[in-house]
Amino acid sequence: MKKNAEITINEEWCKSCEICVAFCPKKVYEMGRFYPKIVRPEDCTACMLCEKLCPDFAITVTVPDKIEKSQ
């Protein structure tokens, strides 16, 4: 299966506000005990909404073209 994006959450920066969980159009995230968890990464469309809305800049979404160019 083609990877749409690579998502990382910096748990040291995350304050568990759940904005990413609430606004992800594909429901890629679910709230874990303390932090959001990436539960459906294959559904990510790389819309970057989670990264843009995160008030703590704790989420990074990297699209495959950028992943390949950096290697």
Image (spheres, rainbow, N blue to C red):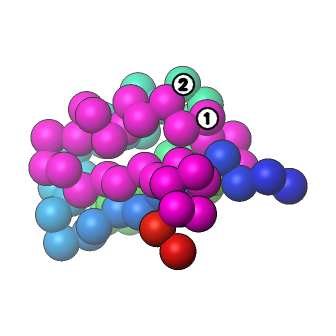
Q: Position of residue 39 (x, y in %)?
A: 61, 55
Q: Nearer the viewer, residue 58 or 17?
A: 58
Q: Is residue 56 magenta?
A: yes
Query: What residue appears at the point 15 percent right and 63 percent down from the top-left corner?
Result: 13
Query: What residue appears at the point 50 percent right and 54 percent down from the top-left corner?
Result: 66
Q: Position of residue 8 (x, y in %)?
A: 41, 63
Q: What element does badge 2 sit on?
A: loop
Compared to residue 59, the image places residue 27 above or below, namely: above
Depth check, mark 2 against mark 1: the one in front is 1
What residue type is disc 1 on?
Thr
Point out the stretch of residues depicted in magenta.
Answer: 42-69
Q: Is residue 68 left or right of residue 49?
A: right
Q: Position of residue 18 (x, y in %)?
A: 31, 41
Give the image quarter of residue 60.
bottom left
Q: Nearer the viewer, residue 45 or 20?
A: 45
Give whichever of discs 2 and 1 has the lower sequence position.
2
Q: Is residue 8 visible?
A: yes
Q: Is residue 32 visible?
A: no
Kindly identify which numbered label has been placed on residue 45.
1
Compared to residue 18, the image places residue 34 above or below, namely: below
Contact (Cβ within 8 Å) of mark 2 with mark 1 = yes
Query: What residue appears at the point 54 percent right and 38 percent down from the top-left corner?
Result: 46
Q: Is residue 37 magenta?
A: no
Query: What residue appears at the point 69 percent right and 41 percent down from the top-left corner?
Result: 43
Kindly identify which numbered label has been placed on residue 25.
2
Compared to residue 50, the image places residue 10 above or below, namely: below
What residue type is disc 2 on?
Pro
